[in-house]
Amino acid sequence: MIESRYIRQEIMPQIGESGQALLAQAQVAIVGLGALGSVSSEILARSGVGYLRLIDRDVVELSNLQRCALYTEEDANAATSKALAARDHLKSINSTIYTEPQVCEVNSSNVLKLLSGVDLILDGSDNFEVRALINEAANKLGIPWIYTGVLGALSMVMPILPGGPCLRCLSPTVPEPGSYPTCTTNGVLPSTTRIAATLQATQALKLLLNKPKLPSIPLKELPTTTLYQIEVWEPEFEMVTVEKNPACAVCGLHHYELLENHDLL
């Protein structure tokens, strides 16, 4: 008798054989396949998530190899598209799942099409503008997503369900490009990105396994979510409760500024 490749998951009470079957049917879109998306996509592929939509416009560069788990020097030397390189590497890890690469920039004219038809969206982007656009699209489509950010030695992860609270409840305004620190300007540790992506992937598995049980949220209620913050240099773990803002432009008023104005992004 051939042992299941997922036996170490199936014997966990949180998953079991029935949960593994749910993961095989699950569909996830990953926006950005750099330091975050390359790790979370590998974890989901190894976990048996059946369909991964891999979205990234960039190519693999030598500086990516410091923190992007999937890629090799060969990918960087050939300037291979991250989406295509990720597809090939994930296929070699798990040939039983389906991967759909999308080599393109995510913008207001294509984001709804790119993110439609999936059960969950993972944020692997590296700028707030794209995250704000994902937030609007996910809210409009009614799809849960997981915000994930890193900078230096700090990791941040926040699951966001339909109905809110959403990213704009946490940060009501979209900062101007270039007005905030990034990994390009301030650096980042590879351990920071791996911890963030690992927590993101774990939260993803929990949402996918509980999808049939997700309750609808009455509009009169003000639900909360949790922002997880991990400082890895001097290890600290903090959980911050984020409350829904009834006046939130996105999850409260359903005003989709970025989606509706193509000149903004």
Image (tube, rainbow, N blue to C red):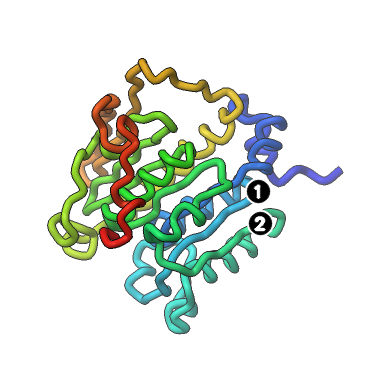
Q: Which residue is depicted at the point 19% across and 60% down? A: 177
Determine which quarter of the picture holds residue 104.
bottom left
Task: Identify the element where label 2 is drawn.
Answer: strand
Q: Residue 83: x and y, percent?
A: 50, 67
The C terminus sits in image quarter: bottom left
Q: Which label number is shown at residue 50?
A: 1
Q: Measured from the top left, where is residue 134 in percent x and y?
A: 38, 49
Which residue in the structure is indicated by mark 2?
98
Q: Which element type, helix, strand or loop, lies under badge 1?
A: loop
Q: Is residue 152 visible?
A: yes
The amino acid marked with disc number 2 is: Tyr
Residue drawn at (29%, 26%) of the image: 244
What residue type is disc 1 on? Gly
On-image quarter of the N terminus = top right
Judged left or right of residue 112, residue 234 is left
In the image: residue 233, left or right of residue 179:
right
